[in-house]
Structures are given as C-alpha cells and as structure tokens.
Amino acid sequence: MFEDRTYENIRDEMLAEFPSDIDTREGSIAYDAVAGVAAKVAMLYIDISNCYELTNLEKSSGEYLDRFASEHGVTRIKATNARYRFIYEGTKPELGTSFYDANGDNYYTLNEDDEGLILVSDLTGTTQNVVVTGTDAIPVDNIEGLIHAEFGELIVPAINKETDDSLRSRIRDKISGPAENGNRSQYQSWCEEVEGVGRALIFPLFYGPNTVKAVLISPDGLPPAKSVIDNVQTYIDPIKPAYIAHDPDKPTIVIGTLGSGYGDGVAPIGAHFLAVAAKKYDINIQLSVELKTDINIDDVKNKITQAITAYFKSLALEAEDSKVIRFNRISSIIEQLNVVFDFCNLTVNGKRENVTIEDDYVAVLAGVTVNVTV
C-alpha cells in the first residue's frame, strides 16, 4: 500500500524542497538535517501498513484475527482438557484430588459427571489423549484405604486451540452465508459455535418436512464425543419431548428421534433437529518400499501415518469433495515425503482406486502396512 514510501524516496523528496543554492550532498548540513526525519517517517509508513494488514482478514493473525472475528460474532475455539473415566478399588477419593499417569508426565484432577467419577487433565490439547485404558492413576498424596486406581476409557478427547486458518475459514463462511432465518448456513454456524465441533454437514428435510439433520466432525477430523453431540442438540433443539419421525411410505416404521421443535433452543419453532456424530470409515494402506540407508521402517511408517492422517483431517474439515479419498493423492503424499528411495504395490483398502464414503462417515486411518523390498 505504501511501497513507494521508502527512506530513500522520502529523503530525496525533502532534499528537493531546498533552494538550488543549498548544498544537499551526503554529509552536508541539509542532508544530515533531513536524514533522521526521513527515517522516522519511513518507519511510520511501515507501522501504518502493518496496522492495515492486521485489520485485513487474509493478513491478520493471532489476537488481531480474534478481534476481527468478534466483530462478526465468531469466537476462536479454545483448547480443551481430556476426560477419562476413573476406576478404583477401596476408599473413594475426594473430588479435586490430583493424580498422575504411570510416566509422571501429566497431572489430572478428579471430578464427577452424571455417570460417575472422571479424571480431567490439567493441561489442554491433543497431547492429553494418549493415556491407555488400564494405566495406573497414581495419587499425588497418599490416600488411606485406596487399594487401586486406574484410567478408564477416554470419554471426551481434548482438542487443540483453533488455528488461524480454521478461524479465518469460519469467518468467511459467516460473512458470505448469509447465516440467518434458520437457513442451511445458520444451522451450520450454530453447530460450529459449540466447543468440540470442527465441521457440521447439514441435511435439510432428511426425515421429512420441517426436519434437519447435522453430521458433526471434531476439530481433529474425527467423530466427536457424545457429550459434544448432546451439547449441540440441547443448544439447537432439545429432545424434550422427543419428536418421532416415521417413514412416509411405512408409517409404522420409526426413522428418527429428533428435537421437539418447541423453540426451546436457537432453532425456529416447528423445526425438528437432530445432531449425530460422523461414523468412522476405516482406511488401510499397504505398500512396499526400498529403504534409504539412514532410515528404518518404523520411521517410514510414522511419517506416512502422520501425513495421511493430516490429509484425511483436511478432507474432513476443509474439502468440498470430502467424500472421495483419492488414490493418486495418497501416492503423491508418500512420494513427497522423500523418506524412501522408491515404493510400489500401493493399495488403499486392498485396491488401487479411489474410495468413496457415504455422507455420514469420515475417513480414519486404521492402519499402515509397510513391506521392505530387497
């Protein structure tokens, strides 16, 4: 915007204002008098340019992007804690008691929900989702009468703080919607406002007139936890009482149990809504590789797993054509990793072709099998 407002240009323009009989060569009194001022003015233009970019959707980041988002009623999704079921024998520990895992890496606080005791990670982010069921939960302080304690299943996975790119995409959707009057865009916005939802796929009239179905995906590109589904349902259209949808051709057959449509949520009166989690569609990848001398097979497998998982996540959260897993794209990703001399016999679910999944599903990498060729 101010590309021509450089130190040199500003200095020369100021020197040009002096009368012709004044010495303006470098080192002269006139030159030295304007040099410092020109430098300060040039810096001012740089600051103005930076300020302009920080108020621009495509250029802003961090807290400045948050401010831009707030002007449009959008809030960055915060990182959350992981929640594990708590299993114990002996004396019941008091709520608020601190535990740590077997490695002593992370600490967890004992809490409670409607179904029993839970351990909530003190830290946030997906790094807290790695405790294996059955791992010992070790109390920080000795608890008299507690015989044994361990981590149960991961009931609410933690999520990372929303990235700038993801937030920027949601702001664009909000601006271009328009999300209003209970249209498709507004149902999507309502769903994605709830913590734990990365993307919502909206299917109007899915169960008949005045019905809406939303298939929800977590910010990690996976099926979200049940608690997230319940929160979305309650926010948009609580199931109190339930509305029973029947097959129009076979009225005795129930095809869905939806929200009441009473307008107790944000959905309009008369609109029956149902939130469901996307289902996992397992993808297995197999290939043969010629290893480089300084790389082992475990490194290759880990690199491929990370890259393909990132590809599936981008499909689930960003791609318009999110239901097609492209064989050539997977092949290209592996080639670009540059971790092997060569590879062959690549298959995706046993075939060398694209895989198409249904609307209710999200692709999940179930396994990577790497064979070494001699």
Image (cartoon, rainbow, N blue to C red):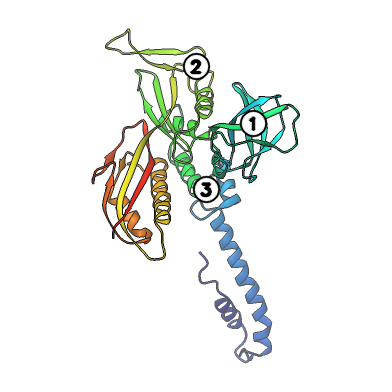
Residue 10 image offset from top left, x and y in percent: 58, 76
Identify the disc placed on residue 149: 1
Identify the disc placed on residue 226: none
Q: Is there any visible trace of residue 18 in the rendered image?
A: yes
* Callout 2 secondary element: loop
What separation in Å lies between label 3 and label 1 (alpha carbons)?
A: 36 Å
**The one of 81 and 60 positioned closer to us in this rendering:** 81
For the residues labelled 2 and 1, say whether their Cβ atoms are less than 8 Å apart: no
Query: Given the image, on which type of amino acid does mark 1 rest?
Result: Ala
What separation in Å lies between label 2 and label 3 (alpha carbons)?
A: 33 Å
What separation in Å lies between label 2 and label 1 (alpha carbons)?
A: 36 Å
Tell me which numbered mark, 2 or 3, is placed earlier along the sequence.
3
The answer to whether 14 is drawn above or below residue 117 in the figure is below
Identify the disc placed on residue 163: 3
Tell me which numbered mark, 3 or 1, is placed earlier along the sequence.
1
* Callout 1 secondary element: strand
For the residues labelled 3 and 1, say whether their Cβ atoms are less than 8 Å apart: no
**The one of 139 and 359 positioned closer to us in this rendering:** 139
For mark 2, what is the residue?
A: 239
| Point 60% across, 50% down: residue | 63
